[in-house]
Image (cartoon, grey):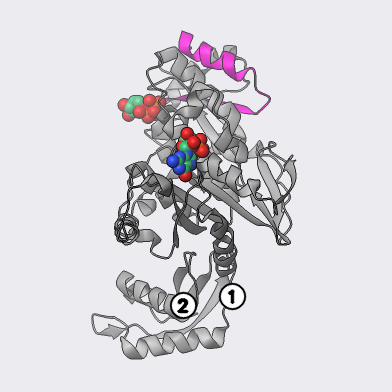
Amino acid sequence: MSKPVVAIVGRPNVGKSTIFNRIVGERISIVEDIPGITRDRLYSSADWLTHEFNIIDTGGIEIGDEPFLEQIRQQAEIAIQEADVIIFLTNGREGVTAADEQVAKILYKTKKPVVLAINKIDNPDMRSMIYDFYSLGFGEPFPISGSHGLGLGDLLDEVAKNFPEQDEEEYPENVIKFSLIGRPNVGKSSLVNSFLGDERVIVSEIAGTTRDAIDTQYEYDDQPYVIIDTAGMRKKGKVYETTEKYSVLRALRAIERSDVVLVVLNAEEGIQEQDKKIAGYAHEAGKAVIIVVNKWDAVEKDEKTMNKTTKMIREHFLFLDYAPIIFVSAKTNQRVHSILPIINRVSENHAMRVTSSVLNEVIEDSVARNPAPTDKGRRLRIYYATQVAIKPPTFVVFVNEPEIMHFSYERFLENRIRESFDFEGTPIRLITRART
Ligand code: GDP
Ligand code: GDP
């Protein structure tokens, strides 16, 4: 089930990133806690009342050296393409400008709901400034103030009213959904071709899903698979489609709809910041992850190269210590056939349930080896643990006082759980709760 996507569009300086940060709230700082990942403040999950959604600040997508108006135009097109609801943001202090009208003109082309917000209305006396904006043709303008956090509730109510009906789950339960993500040119579409080129693969159709015809469904050894967003990997038409940030955006949506994410690296180019960002999103989203080092044919190597590269990858992707690494070549098909068995394995681990009795034995044994932390003379007492969810496996540990639980002790327990069960390829989550 994918969450609705909200995009903010508008010319520069109207307050898009201010509003984005307001709506996203404290989440960004949580996300930045993952060591080794710097973050684009461009795309984030958010919630309002009972609604969960994703939000994009299209202003953060800079498109090459395109002139100013062309930039705004393409950002608006991205919003139309990617969003379910669009927030069209303007500046109430400046009135309707020619650039606002340009944005409006592009947004007229979409059937998607557009909610018009007038920013910088910092106090009630300024509300009369919003009437001009009816002329843009998007109905009632919502006055807001990003700096003061005013009017956002009404705006988000209106946005949420326009969310589409939740899609039914797109594919049957037994289907393994996976995606290939990575920078442009690492070889994602070549790998897809290599998968599908195997004569035992039965491609059922290029599925017309509820969104676009973007996925590929196929079967291998009676196991059904869906490659998520195949179109996004192959299509490189519009100017913005070749920009790195747009490819990240596309990747994020693909990650969300997947069970397993193949993070594809280019063996020739080493690891770049962008690789880490994308992989970081897969980790945060709680997906099973496999690191695929492609173009292995193009690397000059001796018997140590694979070990050295593995070590280098582990150092760069500390947060993905659970992800298997495989070295392949889409060009020569070397080891491409061994990717599917790994997908099967990590997908199984991602959905694994462990019994409470064995889990609690592991916890008890862990506490015996490494006593729980103390704080101001009080000791953490762990009563019991239980698995509350799969995909990813999520455990709740009930304790006397959650404040005494220390991050490092949580990591210790997590590692112990990992050592005791086979969770290769999947993140696991641990939540500490007070026993009531
Ligand atoms: P963006 O280019 O559309 O992302 O705009 P920014 O979010 O960077 O904001 C542009 C400028 O407007 C910054 O100096 C903000 O502090 C300011 N700004 C944003 N929201 C408001 C607001 O509600 N009231 C006022 N007075 N200034 C604001
Ligand atoms: P994408 O943008 O990630 O989908 O990358 P493509 O699949 O379009 O590949 C980009 C370029 O790398 C193309 O010229 C491919 O022929 C080339 N390429 C892809 N896989 C390999 C590989 O395993 N080895 C070599 N030498 N080149 C590859």
Query: Which residue is found at the position 50% from the left and 73% from the top?
Result: 395
| 263 inside magenta stretch | no
Image side of residue 397 versus residue 219, left or right: left
Amino acid type of the residue that numbered disc 2 sits on in the rendered structure:
Val
Query: Which residue is found at the position 32% from the left and 83% from the top?
Result: 372
| 106 inside magenta stretch | yes
Give the percent coordinates (x, y) of residue 96.
Answer: 48, 12
**Would you place residue 122 above or below residue 102 in this image?**
below
Of 30 and 116, nearer the camera is: 30
Look at the numbered disc 1 and say if its residue's Cβ is closer than 8 Å to ligand 2.
Answer: no
Residue lying furthest right: 204
Amino acid type of the residue that numbered disc 1 sits on in the rendered structure:
Arg
Write down the residue under mark 1: 353
Query: Which residue is found at the position 61% from the left and 40% from the top?
Result: 230
Quarter of the image holding residue 4? top right
The numbered disc on residue 70 is none
Evaluate whether residue 382 shows in this view.
yes
Query: Which residue is found at the position 52% from the left and 53% from the top?
Result: 261
Label 2 neighbour load within 10 Å: few <14, some 14-19, many 20+: many
At mark 1, the secondary structure is: loop
Judge depth for marks 2 and 1 and give the one in front. Answer: 1
The numbered disc on residue 397 is 2
Q: Tell me the CA gap for discs 2 and 1.
A: 15 Å
Evaluate whether residue 1 shows in this view.
no
Q: Which residues are magenta?
A: 97-119
Give the percent coordinates (x, y) of residue 368.
Answer: 35, 91
Give the percent coordinates (x, y) of residue 155.
Answer: 55, 34
**Would you place residue 83 above or below residue 367 in this image?**
above
Query: Is the Cβ of the residue at disc 2 closer than 8 Å to that at disc 1?
Result: no
Give the percent coordinates (x, y) of residue 184.
Answer: 45, 36
Label 1 neighbour load within 10 Å: few <14, some 14-19, many 20+: some
Taking the image in four quarters, ligand 1 sits in the one at: top left
